[in-house]
């Protein structure tokens, strides 16, 4: 496949998904080859995340609010990529309104699909999207995307099943424009906990050394005592087994405490010595290569890393898409042939109003 597939990225963050879809990086000694995707547009509302993005990519992302952004200013593209904000769909705090302001941002992605009509889209979100409100949340989101003219497929993928040292389950949605005859199949797992494939990759593969000299990463004795008092009420252990994948890292890593649900390292059991991950360790847990730079404060880096889509996981999904496109000769001729420029029929996000008969009326 010689022609590049043009990608527009929204909710880009620091660029985890974008690195994955483009490829051309190494992680844990494995080469993730370049894929036939090209970023032609990227957007995020966090200036610090965009600063990191622009340090690592040749294409410069823009700082903008997707709710106010005019799609007329976007170039033509074949694929829309976006991991819309997921906090509202988290099962950690199920009392939240799943359709609060952040929870409705997927609508903005739907608006872009309606306005620009790309051939594909890839969306990502937390596992909770599938189970909240007895699955009605996901059903509503899928209907909204399908109403823009797309056939939707989704699958829950675990990062650990693809050689990433982290148990991180995320829902991936692939949309294919209805006029395109193409059936996408998600990639098979490359690793397994139970055998039959390569073993899951352990956390120890990305931890430089357990005992660091820099004391700022260690928890105080007071914090340890507080953890011991609260431990009986905790839902899961925090200290990680270096021989197993890490529990899910989040954007809270900068403020992680021993009473939080975030993973930490037990350095010395007899001394009750615990520490948090360094930013580089956290980035490796997310499958960022060491060549990926974070030119921001540590707190900003932690937040960006925790919010990111693991590059290796996105690479696996994007690679499956590109391979299947390449193998489908009829489809390959169709998708890249010269066609009327649908993307020129663009409308501003403000011009497209919510339909009166919205499918998003969900019983809370």
Image: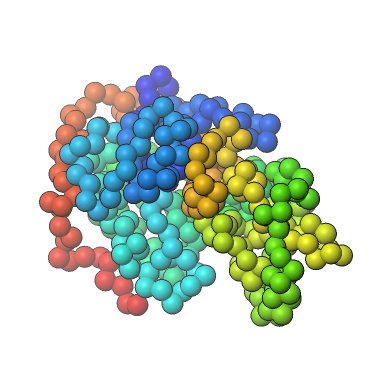
x, y percentage for residue 276?
67, 56
Which quadrant of the view contains residue 229? bottom right
Query: Outermost residue, top direction?
Result: 2
The correct choice, above or below, for 37 with respect to 93 in the image is above
x, y percentage for residue 26?
61, 31
Query: Outermost residue, left direction?
Result: 351
Q: Please indicate whether residue 169 sits to the left or right of residue 201 in the image.
A: left
Query: Outermost residue, right direction?
Result: 270
- Mark yes or no: residue 331 visible: no
Q: Please indicate whether residue 307 sits to the left or right of residue 235 in the image.
A: left
Q: In what quadrant of the picture does the N terminus appear?
A: top left
Which quadrant of the view contains residue 178? top left
Please name whichever residue, 137 or 306, is drawn nearer the observer in this view of the structure: 306
The correct choice, above or below, for 191 with respect to 126 in the image is above
Please tell me which residue is depicted at 53% across the width and 27% down the height of the picture.
Answer: 24
Please tell me which residue is depicted at 71% across the width and 49% down the height of the picture.
Answer: 214
- Mark yes or no: residue 106 visible: yes
x, y percentage for residue 303?
50, 53
Count every numbered label the image shows and give the total: 0
């Amino acid at each position: 496949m010689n022609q590049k597939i043009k990608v527009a990225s929204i909710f880009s963050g620091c660029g985890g998904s974008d690195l994955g879809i483009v490829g051309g990086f190494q992680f844990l000694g494995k080469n993730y080859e370049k894929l036939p995707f090209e970023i032609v547009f990227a957007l995020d509302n966090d200036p610090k995340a965009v600063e990191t993005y622009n340090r690592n990519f040749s294409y410069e992302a823009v700082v903008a609010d997707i709710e106010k952004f005019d799609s007329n200013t976007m170039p033509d593209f074949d694929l829309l990529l976006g991991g819309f904000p997921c906090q509202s769909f988290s099962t950690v705090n199920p009392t939240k309104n799943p359709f609060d302001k952040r929870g409705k941002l997927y609508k903005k992605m739907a608006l872009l699909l309606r306005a620009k009509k790309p051939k594909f889209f890839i969306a990502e979100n937390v596992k909770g999207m599938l189970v909240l409100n007895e699955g009605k949340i996901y059903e509503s989101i899928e209907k909204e995307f399908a109403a823009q003219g797309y056939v939707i497929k989704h699958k829950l993928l675990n990062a650990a099943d693809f050689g990433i040292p982290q148990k991180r389950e995320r829902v991936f949605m692939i949309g294919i424009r209805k006029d395109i005859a193409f059936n996408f199949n998600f990639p098979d797992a490359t690793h397994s906990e139970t055998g039959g494939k390569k073993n899951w990759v352990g956390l120890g593969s990305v931890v430089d050394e357990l005992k660091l000299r820099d004391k700022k990463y260690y928890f105080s004795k007071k914090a340890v005592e507080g953890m011991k008092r609260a431990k009986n009420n905790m839902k899961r252990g925090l200290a990680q087994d270096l021989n197993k994948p890490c529990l899910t890292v989040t954007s809270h890593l900068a403020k992680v405490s021993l009473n939080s649900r975030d993973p930490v390292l037990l350095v010395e059991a007899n001394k009750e010595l615990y520490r948090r991950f360094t930013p580089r360790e956290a980035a490796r847990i997310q499958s960022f290569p060491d060549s990926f730079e974070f030119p921001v404060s540590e707190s900003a880096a932690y937040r960006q890393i925790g919010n990111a889509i693991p590059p290796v996981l996105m690479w696996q999904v994007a690679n499956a898409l590109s391979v299947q496109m390449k193998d489908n000769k009829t489809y390959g001729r169709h998708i890249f042939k010269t066609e009327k420029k649908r993307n020129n029929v663009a409308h501003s996000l403000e011009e497209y109003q919510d339909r009166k008969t919205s499918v998003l009326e969900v019983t809370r």
